[in-house]
Amino acid sequence: MQTNLKLGLITAAVMAVNGIPAHAQDGAPSLQLEEVLVTARKREESLQDVSVAVSAVTDTALNDAHIRNSADLTKLVPSLTLAGGGGSFVIRGIGTQAFSAGVEASVSTLIDGVVLGRAGHGFMQLVDIQRVEVLRGPQGTLFGKNSSGGVVHFITKNPSDEFEADISATAIEHGEYRLGGTISTPVTDTFGVRFTYGGIRDDGYIKNVYDGETYNGGDSDTFRFKARWLPTDSLELKWSSDLASEDDSNQISTLRSTPDPDIAAEVLPVVASEENYKVNLDGEIFREVDRFGHSLEINWDIGDYTVTSISAYRDNETLASGDVDARPTNPSGFDQVESDQQDQFTQELRLTSPGDASLRYVAGLYLFLQTLDKQVTREVVGTVTTSDYSVDTTNYAAFGELTYDFTDSIRGILGGRYTYDELEYDFQRDGFIPAPVAPFSDGDDDSDFSGKVVLEWDVMDDAMTYASYAEGYKGQAYNVTFGTIPPLDPVDPELSETFEIGFKSKLFDNRVMFNATIFRTDYEDFQGQTQIDDGENSGFALTNAGEVRTQGLELDFTGLVSENLTVFGGVAFIDATIESFENGPCSQVQKFNGDCPEGSQDLSGGDLPYSPDWKINLNANYLVPLERMPFDLVAKLAYQGQDDTLMNITQDEGTVQSSYHVFDLALTLEANDDSWDTTIFVKNITDEGYATNISTSQIAFNPGGYDQRLSKNSRRTAGIEFRYRWY
């Protein structure tokens, strides 16, 4: 039945698109899709002209879907999912599978061209965003070594040429309130500024019966300032500063199952189940995040060439504590507090040739400096142990991409990136469990060259196809964690090879955009985690898992069915498989059940986690003109569905979320002069339950049991939003 529903939805979408007439009745072209510009190849180009599998989510699409947090982008990009319920992005099944301080993200996140050094830094309020570009698959040539899975690029709005301002207010069930506003104005003919604020006050939706508190909410404030100065006709300077503060309850999990009857009785009145939104915890739970960043972008036109410089500094501080045992008592006296501080400096310098020449190129230099300091204090049965460690990263690279027009319709592209990496770490541990470690330092370096070859062919005026081969590189890493025992050998770099065939088109007088991509990517020395147990210490360690393959088909479309009806969406069919991982980890439940007597297992042939075999998103916006009113009505219906999803690389069947289907509905009143709009929306109107993450509980605290992360939208939720604009 699920397969029939999936095929029915795809068929309906294709019929809607293919049913669009090629011309209006008078023979002239009818409505036209707006051109979407992207910077996927480090120069501004039409989305339909780039031989890259990229999804561009515009500000209009974000507003229509009421997406205010980057984690919710998964609702609009089928190939994009989340690991751990929101720990990192996953694209085409590839995401960060280990979270040592010494390992970099598999999916690179950027804001206005500036790489964010850690996986979690890409989760933010989407405040005053122009668009989000999701580049699918390795993008090592132009975007660097930490893009082995893909790129998520957030592009903010520039100061406007004329005064504009807007304010929005949103109220959502379970005590969530949002307020946002922007003022943009020219100061002189050549200088303009833009101020933006976004705030959230959220009571949370997970209730703690122990003390009546609610979790998975909190307060968040984001401020952004952007200035643009044109001192001459050939010189542009853009300064951007952002500041964000989060004070929340730390995203916590609930009990999904409690096989031990004594533990089940202890946590009452909480009853573990797939629909459990309650906890019974006595621990101190909090998370405080403060981050800021500054960047200066300079674009200097020298004749027909452009020199671009992006200099940026970013800083992130986090302090967090959670209740590890998930019970109202603390039988082992286990408490843990973590703090970390990350700062980075990046410098990119590139030269862009004229875009209308038969031979054109982008060439550049890149520097990335990062320091991550972390402290973990853990108390167990009355003993306190503190680990202090830091990891310093130095990375510089030279990159370039050259395009040559063989004919008016056939083009070739060559690209490459030389990367040099240097890692250094410092470590010390005071306490008893595990054993203390005297201050220790070590380091290593590595280099790599990654290449790219593409052939493009315009098969008709409004359609092109391409075939590409590209190499990716994710740098070596150290397994630096609380339980580290130096000296350490670095884990080998992760290498990848990608083959991709794509088709991009504008059909029916530009009333339909239809794109398709077939891909296969092979990863060698894939960086993952394994289980270690030397008799004194046990835990997870960073390792080279072996070989991984991800392959599949992606479809994207947008269609103007009529003057009042727009449909858009996408489908991803992805097979992400572990080809070789002989010494893989075991889950806590597998060990408890005796399924892993050796402490590890051969995971070869298994599935990669957080990658459903199919995922679909479909959207329809229908305008209902109200001729006698100063406003119109817009009805918006959205559907997201996905197949069964494994959420633990151990292949534990208890960590599989069954397929589900979610429908969202919104009704918007839009002023005829576009000065205001009001929306009533309902998320998950059928109240379809699902978990965003399922994990096995620690044997010491819930033997044989499972935990789960439930999002607010995993049950029906209603809200209302009002927005007003000044021009």
Image: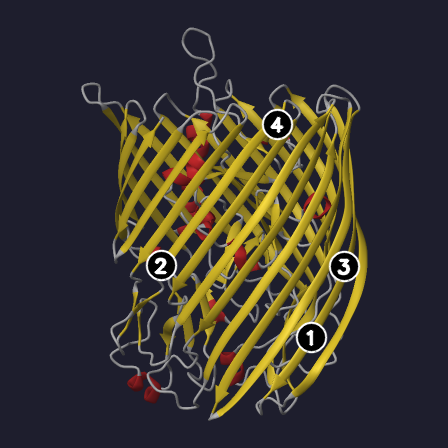
- Mark 3 or 2 closer to N-term? 2
Discs 3/2, front: 2
Q: Quadrant of residue 597?
A: bottom right
* Measured Cα–Cα span from mark 3 to mark 2: 38 Å
Q: Quadrant of residue 323?
A: bottom left
Describe the element under mark 4 as helix, strand or loop: strand
Describe the element under mark 1 as helix, strand or loop: strand
Describe the element under mark 3 as helix, strand or loop: strand
The residue at 75%/41% (across/down) is 364
Residue where numbered disc 2 is placed:
219
Discs 4/3, front: 4
- Mark 4 or 3 closer to N-term? 4
Describe the element under mark 2 as helix, strand or loop: strand
In depth, the one of 561 and 33 nearer the eye is 33
Residue 231 is labelled as 4
In depth, the one of 711 and 201 nearer the eye is 201
* Measured Cα–Cα span from mark 1 to mark 3: 17 Å
Residue where numbered disc 1 is placed:
426
Q: Is residue 513 above or below residue 452?
A: above
Residue 348 is labelled as none
Discs 4/2, front: 4
Residue 421 is labelled as 3
Residue type at tag 1: Asp
Q: Quadrant of residue 24?
A: top left
Q: Is residue 248 above or below residue 479?
A: above
* Measured Cα–Cα span from mark 1 to mark 4: 46 Å
- Mark 1 or 3 closer to N-term? 3
- Mark 2 or 1 closer to N-term? 2
The residue at 46%/9% (across/down) is 28
Residue type at tag 3: Asp
Residue type at tag 2: Asp
